[in-house]
Amino acid sequence: MILEENKGGALHGTYRVIRGHSVSGVVRPPGDKSISHRAVIFGSIAEGRTEISGFLNSADCEGTLRAFESMGVRVDRQSPHQMVLESPGRLNLLEPNDVLDFGNSGTAVRLMTGLFAGIPGFRVVTGDESLRSRPMRRITEPLKRMGADLDGREDGSLLPLAVRGGTLNPIVYENLHRSAQVKSALLLAGLGADGPTTVIEPDPSRDHTERLLPRFGGRLEKVGSHVTVWPSHLTGTDISVPGDISSASFFVALSLLIPDSHLVLENVGLNPTRTAFIELLLRMGAKIEVVSNPEGENGEPFGNLDIRFSELKGCTVPLEIIPSLIDEIPILAALAAFAWGTTEIRGAAELRVKESDRISAMVSALRAVGIEVEEFPDGLAIMGEGPDRALRGGRIDSRHDHRIAMAMAVLGTRLPPGESLLITGTDFVDTSFPDFSALFNGVVR
Ligand code: S3P
């Protein structure tokens, strides 16, 4: 076994990884996290029946589902990935009788706060230690401009937030954080405004809200960089969630890194606002074949990726694509160490306020295994030394961040024979990819 997952005992919540010799097989990544959250949120505010298949049953998405159950949405679960929701409609959701705890999930807490601002009732939202330190002003400030009645620690900058919903004023808002969470929170709030609400994006962020909301009857229009939503009555529909390209990225990286590898990833979401990682790797010399079904289901394209071991060239990541590969930067940084030459990632200061400070976490972890890295306030540069570069084992801290843990597990497969890497804080992998270690051990030999 290349990746030993320790659950229990003194090593609880750790991975131990050793060298892998090749990767082969076929993997179906788990359901997309962003789409699973939205399927549950929209299905829970759309009157009537919504059937969701391909749902990601991770800690984050299960938390969103539980929150709606506590507000009167009926959930009939056929399997971990399949369910039928029955909703009384957006304006008839009940007031929950306790604080809603969204755990580690920034997407859940930000989108739900936007929603709650525009529906009747009083709600308090919070999260785990990491989420309670993440910035909320980016949503509370524009929501207050819409007339929302909400408050929180440090004048609404930090969780917990208390929201008393009501009718909102429409606004036009420029999303300078380039954040899909901010955009989606405001579009959800806009459903409860008394006119059209517009969000302007300088660079496109993931557009799942724009693609999915109209499926439920939401009136939404996209013109250039402007997205406008009108107050709309939503009705239930069926949603099929494709595989998560961000989870798939760890398997893409494994196959590119380990000689003699050939892996097929099936049913991967290929929404163009999420594929910048693949496009960048192709430019770096990766042998990846993309077989896409552009029609997709629910307007979300998906397809298969066929990946073979490749020698990569380092690159400077173009600033404008940063929002479209923001979650893939930890694994990109790991891959870059095995490319030829330097890879520079700038304009990514947002990484400092993710589940952990991902710039600092990756810089420390990469240095700990012997990789030369330069840290910038808004990014990092990784000195690549090609596919046979040296690496040393030891112990690194994932800082309870799922993507740091998985990126470093992938890197661990390039250790010299006889060495191992102990990664701590890996229990948080369950927030996005509960089967990661099983799928990993199924394809790496
Ligand atoms: C997400 C948006 C991104 C991403 C997160 C999921 C979403 O965050 O990092 O994992 O589902 O809208 P930001 O919008 O804050 O960049």
Image: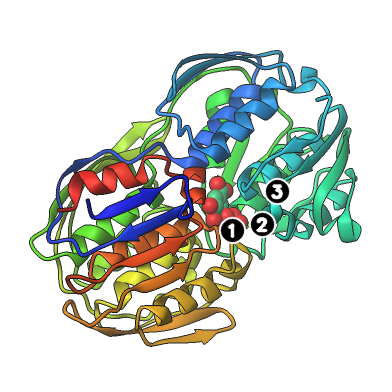
Measured as percent of width and height from the top left, residue 351 is found at 56, 68
Q: In the image, what residue type sits under mark 1?
A: Glu
The residue tagged 2 is 130
The answer to whether the residues at label 2 and label 1 have Cβ atoms under 8 Å apart is yes
Q: Quadrant of residue 276?
A: bottom left
Left or right of 189? Residue 351 is left
The residue tagged 1 is 355
Q: Is residue 125 above or below residue 361?
A: above
Q: In the image, what residue type sits under mark 3?
A: Thr
The residue tagged 3 is 198
Near mark 1 (Cα within 10 A), the count class, few <14, some 14-19 or many ≥20, is many
Q: Secondary structure at mark 1?
A: loop
Q: Who comes first in sequence, dot 3 or dot 2?
A: 2
Q: Secondary structure at mark 3?
A: strand
Q: Who comes first in sequence, dot 1 or dot 3?
A: 3
The answer to whether the residues at label 1 and label 3 have Cβ atoms under 8 Å apart is no
What sort of colour scheme is used for the picture?
Answer: rainbow
Near mark 3 (Cα within 10 A), the count class, few <14, some 14-19 or many ≥20, is many
| 152, 418: nearer the viewer | 418
